[in-house]
Image (cartoon, coloured by chain):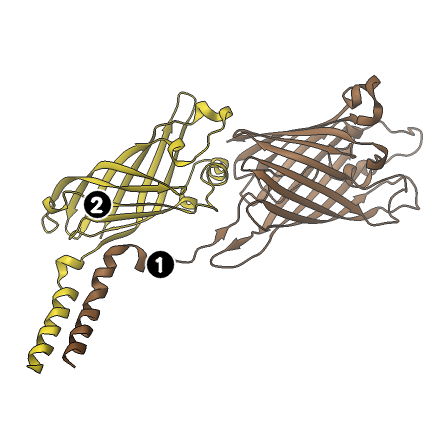
């Protein structure tokens, strides 16, 4: 009886610990997020090339973690105002997204190709959490999965105060574009 | 023993599940990069004097500094608004850490220029440095007609210099403090009983009220025995408003000259006598 228990428990350990499909994680710490605010007076845009993100092909769970300080603007003063006045990045250093790739089962990660899936989850900016649903494009090529998505947000939904003097320079419909190569 | 083995197996298997709870958790801690402290002050002036803030590379900060007359001149002078001293000038970023600036003031018809170099930045992360340190050297040229034209006058007599070390720390999101050891050199002085080299210590303080406004205090202490007794130390209290494109600094001060040598060593007004003037700086950044 005893050897049987040993063997079965070992099998149990192995089946959970090493079953590859369940634990495979796609990860990147160099994902790109771009935002674009268009008004008739001024276009404002910035890039973050240090986005940390991961997803599990087994469950479809997907997460993003973005350091606000890493958004790069063309104008240094804009970057300072973005951090200091709008995002208050010392107080709220990170924005996060945690959600699910809803049709993950329809993506074959072993076969090169382009797949689309709805992605649904919670976006947190300045401690305000809102649900965001969009469509992601997943391009499988060998070991790399390139994922692209975009959605629009209103900064005023996330506790970002826009003073009346610059009110017409900042869009209420800012486009966020995501482009990540997962490995 | 049997139960123990089963328990062990379950425990061993369990960590695999816990990974799902936060996919990014096990990738902490992040790699160490320098985290620079930014916006120690709203702009590159505390009130009269410079702060450690710099203009970024290829940016030009156009500045108009305006001071009215003393409030205690009463309604006849409309509480000082009938008089004005001003400087028009600007700061330019050669690099993010080296700035130059020029200006012209109507006080003694003075042209001034400076070179400013930030060589230590407050930061955490890779290194822990508690302060930002900036060196700044100003030169000024007075272009008034010679007061005594029939004596031998030298061009060098028109020159004066100010050298400062600005040491600032942002203690918290809202509170920043700056110490500014200062040396003013005047080539020509009123009398040999005063000094050509004048040592002073500046103290600046910034307390934010909201994300876009702050209260500033600035005091320049001139060590005794160097300037005439009629002179007093420059003390100013100000209010900064940042609107997005412009920065307005509104303040009360007893100093009149909008350049370093002038407000540090030539201030005549006394707060206790009501010799206080209203002033403002307007700054607008242009990109090249």
Q: Residue A58: x percent and y percent?
A: 15, 53
- Note whether A95 is above or below B7 in the view shown: above
Q: Residue shown at 37%/29% (left/top)?
A: A37
Position of B3 relative to A25 (above/below): below
Query: Label 2, label 1: how many angstroms apart (C-alpha)?
Result: 22 Å
SS type, badge 2: strand
Could you say where residue B162 lies in the image, as x and y percent from the top left? 74, 44
The quadrant where residue A11 appears: bottom left
Quarter of the figure that contains the N terminus of chain B: bottom left
- In the rendered view, does A42 fall on the left or right side of B87? left
Chain letter, brown in picture: B
Query: Residue under circle 1?
Result: B28
In percent of width and height, residue A14 lies at: 13, 69
Q: Chain of mark 1?
A: B
Numbered label attached to residue A111: none
Residue at 31%, 43% (x, y): give it. A32
Q: Is residue B195 left or right of residue A183?
A: right
Q: Is residue B267 visible?
A: no
Q: Residue at x 25, y 53 (%)?
A: A27
Disc 2 and disc 1 in contact, CB within 8 angstroms: no
Q: Which residue is mark 2?
A: A100
Question: Circle 2: is it few (<14), some (14-19), or many (20+) Cα within 10 Å?
Answer: many
Residue B182 x, y percent position in the rendering: 74, 48
Q: Nearer the viewer, residue B142 or B17?
A: B17
Q: Secondary structure at mark 1?
A: loop
- Residue A165 appears anywhere in the view: yes
Depth check: give the residue in front, A59 or B43. Answer: A59
Seen in the picture, residue B157 relative to B66 is either above or below; the reply is below
Q: Colour of chain A?
A: yellow
Q: Nearer the viewer, mark 2 or mark 1?
A: 2
Quarter holding residue B145: top right
| Chain of the residue on which disc 2 is drawn | A
């Amino acid at each position: 009886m005893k050897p049987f228990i040993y063997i079965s428990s070992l099998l149990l350990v192995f089946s959970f610990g090493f079953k590859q499909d369940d634990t495979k994680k796609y990860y990147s710490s160099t994902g790109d997020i771009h935002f674009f605010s268009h008004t008739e007076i001024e276009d404002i845009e910035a890039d973050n090339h240090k986005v940390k993100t991961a997803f599990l092909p087994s469950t479809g769970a997907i997460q993003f973690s973005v350091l606000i300080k890493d958004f790069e603007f063309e104008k240094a003063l804009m970057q300072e105002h973005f951090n200091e006045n709008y995002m208050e990045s010392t107080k709220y250093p990170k924005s996060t997204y945690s959600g699910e790739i809803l049709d993950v089962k329809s993506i074959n990660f072993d076969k090169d190709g382009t797949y689309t899936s709805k992605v649904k989850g919670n976006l947190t900016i300045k401690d305000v959490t809102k649900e965001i649903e969009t469509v992601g494009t997943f391009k499988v090529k060998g070991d790399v999965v390139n994922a692209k998505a975009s959605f629009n947000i209103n900064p005023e939904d996330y506790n970002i105060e826009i003073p009346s003097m610059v009110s017409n320079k900042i869009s209420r419909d800012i486009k966020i574009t995501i482009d990540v190569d997962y490995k | 023993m049997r139960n123990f083995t089963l328990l062990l197996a379950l425990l061993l298997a369990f960590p695999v599940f816990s990974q799902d709870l936060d996919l990014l958790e096990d990738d902490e801690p992040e790699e160490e990069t320098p985290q620079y402290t930014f916006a120690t002050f709203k702009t590159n002036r505390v009130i009269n004097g410079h702060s450690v803030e710099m203009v970024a590379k290829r940016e030009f900060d156009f500045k108009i500094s305006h001071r009215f007359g003393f409030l205690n001149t009463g309604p006849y002078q409309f509480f000082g608004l009938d008089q004005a001293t001003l400087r028009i000038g600007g700061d330019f970023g050669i690099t993010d850490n080296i700035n130059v600036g020029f200006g012209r003031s109507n006080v003694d018809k003075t042209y001034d220029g400076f070179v400013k170099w930030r060589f230590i930045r407050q930061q955490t992360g890779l290194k822990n440095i508690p302060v930002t340190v900036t060196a700044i050297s100003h030169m000024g040229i007075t272009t008034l007609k010679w007061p005594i034209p029939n004596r031998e006058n030298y061009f060098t007599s028109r020159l004066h210099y100010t050298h400062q070390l600005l040491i600032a720390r942002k203690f918290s999101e809202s509170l920043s403090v700056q110490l500014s050891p200062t040396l003013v050199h005047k080539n020509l002085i009123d009398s040999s009983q005063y000094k050509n080299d004048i040592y002073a210590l500046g103290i600046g303080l910034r307390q934010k009220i909201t994300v876009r406004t702050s209260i500033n205090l600035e005091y320049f202490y001139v060590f005794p025995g160097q300037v005439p007794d009629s002179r007093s130390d420059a003390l100013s209290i100000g209010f900064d408003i940042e609107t997005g494109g412009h920065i307005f600094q509104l303040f009360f001060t007893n100093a009149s000259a909008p350049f370093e040598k002038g407000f540090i060593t030539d201030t005549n007004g006394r707060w206790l006598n009501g010799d206080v003037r209203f002033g403002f700086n307007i700054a607008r950044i242009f990109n090249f």
